[in-house]
Image: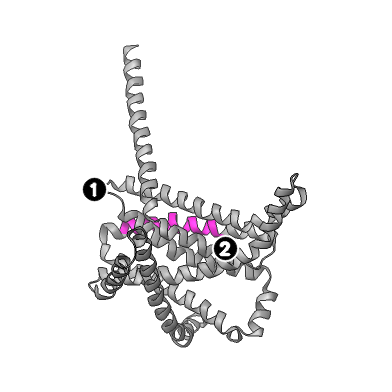
Amino acid sequence: MSGLLALLDDVAAIAKVAAASVDDVVGQAVKASSKAAGALIDDAAVTPKYVHGFEASREIPIVWGIAKGSLFNKLVILLPAALLLSAFAPWLISPLLMIGGAYLCFEGAEKVWHAVNPSDHTVEDLEKEKAAGKGLEEAKVKGAIKTDFILSAEIMTITLSALPPDMALWTSAAVLAVAGVLITLAVYGAVGVIVKADDAGLAMARHGRLGATRALGRGIVKGMPYFMKLLVIVGTAAMIWVGGNIILHGLAELGFEEPYDYVHHLAVEAAHAVPEALAGATEWVVTAVCDGIVGLILGALLIPVAKFVIAPVAGMFSRA
């Protein structure tokens, strides 16, 4: 009997340690995820534009498809890659992130180009998109997952950098996994709410018991198209801004600190020129604008490279 009680005590002690470990993992995941809040907001702003233009019945399935792809990106590809790179080749992290940042700059600049030059997006291209039907939806989901991969890589890298350097490998893996799931749920849960807000407003307008409820529903229905267009603009700007930020940080880590230091200097000078209550916000805005300018210029330079160099080379390999 005493042996059984001793065994139960040992089991209880192990359970307490396991519970403490779980609490520590979740706590570290939440703490580390907060460091990536900026990238998380960018991810939430970018995604709704991929749902824009589809029937209401397809919005949640599209968001769910992107969310599943995002989880795959984070847990199956990026988590092991982050752990391996941090252990064996930490010097590769910045160059790889810079390649992803350059892609974000290119994609954002290309969307700006199509917006200011609608004739460049030919009638034939639009007819092909319209005729694509289900294929267009799949292409949009794949494009969103590809963009999510870059943003997820930034999120996972920021999360990894926020962990204590002496943390055990399995604990780091668990924290990254929990953070990846929490961030994905937060981002795509918010996106799901955004894209279905017009349906909720319509239900309120039709079935609300109070006049104020019906009026609010009508306001939501009328306002959501403008809000979605705004999100498309914000999402495009976010890609350019994040891409430029990744490039500047990457250059600084590789030893080319001048561009990053110059932007930092401009932001600090601007912050000193305004009242102290506005200093933090001003510094952030100036930094974001400068990052965006860098991203837009780089993206514009990459458009002809992608069109006349990368696309033909990729076409040669696809035909081989």
For residue 83: magenta? yes
Is 86 or 3 nearer to us in this picture? 86
- Above/below status of 61 relative to 3: below
Whole-angstrom CA distance, mark 2 to mark 1, is 39 Å
**Mark number displayed over residue 48:** 2
Q: Element at badge 2?
A: helix
* Marks 2 and 1, the one that precedes in the sequence: 2
For residue 168: magenta? no
Q: Residue furthest top?
A: 1
Q: Position of residue 249 (x, y in %)?
A: 31, 68
Three-letter code for the amino acid on which mark 2 is drawn: Pro
Are there few (<14), some (14-19), or many (20+) residues within 10 Å of tag 2? many
* Residue holding disc 1: 166
- Above/below status of 231 relative to 192: below
State whether the magenta stretch is mostly helix, strand or loop: helix
- Above/below status of 11 relative to 85: above
Q: Position of residue 78 (x, y in %)?
A: 40, 59
Q: Quadrant of the N terminus?
A: top left
Q: Is residue 64 visible?
A: no
Q: Position of residue 171 (x, y in %)?
A: 33, 45
Pointer 2 with pointer 1, Cβ within 8 A: no
Q: Position of residue 123 (x, y in %)?
A: 66, 84
What span is in magenta? 66-84
Is 254 or 237 nearer to us in this picture? 237
- Residue 313 placement: quadrant: bottom left
Three-letter code for the amino acid on which mark 1 is drawn: Asp
Q: Residue at x 56, y 85 (%)?
A: 117
Q: Residue at x 48, y 85 (%)?
A: 307
Q: Residue furthest front?
A: 275
Are there few (<14), some (14-19), or many (20+) residues within 10 Å of tag 1? few
Q: Residue at x 71, y 53 (%)?
A: 215
